[in-house]
Amino acid sequence: MAIDKKKTKFRIKRLSQIKTWQLVILLIMSGFISATFLRLNNVGMVERRESVENADKAGDIVNLQQRLYDLQRYVSTHMNADPGKIALDHTYKQMYDRKLKEFEEEIKNQSNNDTVSKVRAVCDARAQQGGYGRFTTQADPRYISCINEEWAKYPAAKAANLQFEAPSTEPYYHTFISPIWSADYAGWSLLVTIFIAMIIVMRLVVLGILKLMLRRQNKLF
């Protein structure tokens, strides 16, 4: 028992050479570095997301595709870089307006120029009265329904069998997923922080067990 007691004291002494407060300071420093790198990852994502939004507003499809690729590549390789749902509102609006114009041209070919202005006047007035516009992010179904209802009142509509359908919004929404952990400065510094925290916890547990063993040994003598 004497040998075990000496070993227990020796182990306690060895563990006590590194103070808990020293490890805590190291943990705080490591945590600050990890938080900084995580923040930088998020800032990098925000910059690329804004580039996508600017390209969407500019209507440059080629540049928009490139910016989307840059954002996707960045998000897929960096933790804490989730951009949320990206809505290409301006690009969709351009497509929506193009489809609506094509539909109106078809109406002109099947009926006359006055039909388009009459349909639009009725639906615009109804939209204004109802508090919704001609266009929203998802193309308000009430306005689309109004167009088709008003157009159906004309004899040419029955012969043409023509209805307006808004383009699907699905291709104009993008969702990119950031990994839980990434092999970059943020990821490695976070592992270091977790490792230091585990050392502190294990050290306290081992010291507690050794001191408990020492007390029991002292009671035996």
Image: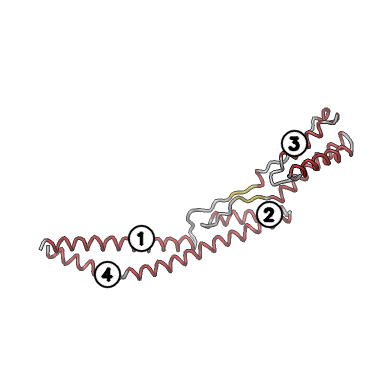
Q: Earlier in the sequence, mark 1 or mark 2?
A: 2
Q: Pointers 1 and 4 in contact (CB under 8 A)?
A: no
Dot 2 corresponds to which residue? Answer: 64
Identify residue type, mark 4: Ser
Q: Nearer the viewer, mark 1 or mark 2?
A: 1
Q: Is residue 125 above or below residue 55?
A: above
Identify residue type, mark 3: Ser
Dot 3 corresponds to which residue? Answer: 145
Q: Residue at x 44, y 65 (%)?
A: 31
Q: Nearer the viewer, mark 4 or mark 2?
A: 4
SS class of the residue under badge 1?
Answer: helix
Q: CA distance from mark 1 to mark 2?
A: 45 Å
Direction from residue 94 to residue 12 in the image, left or right: left
Q: Quadrant of the N terminus?
A: bottom left
Q: Earlier in the sequence, mark 4 or mark 2?
A: 4
Identify residue type, mark 1: Met
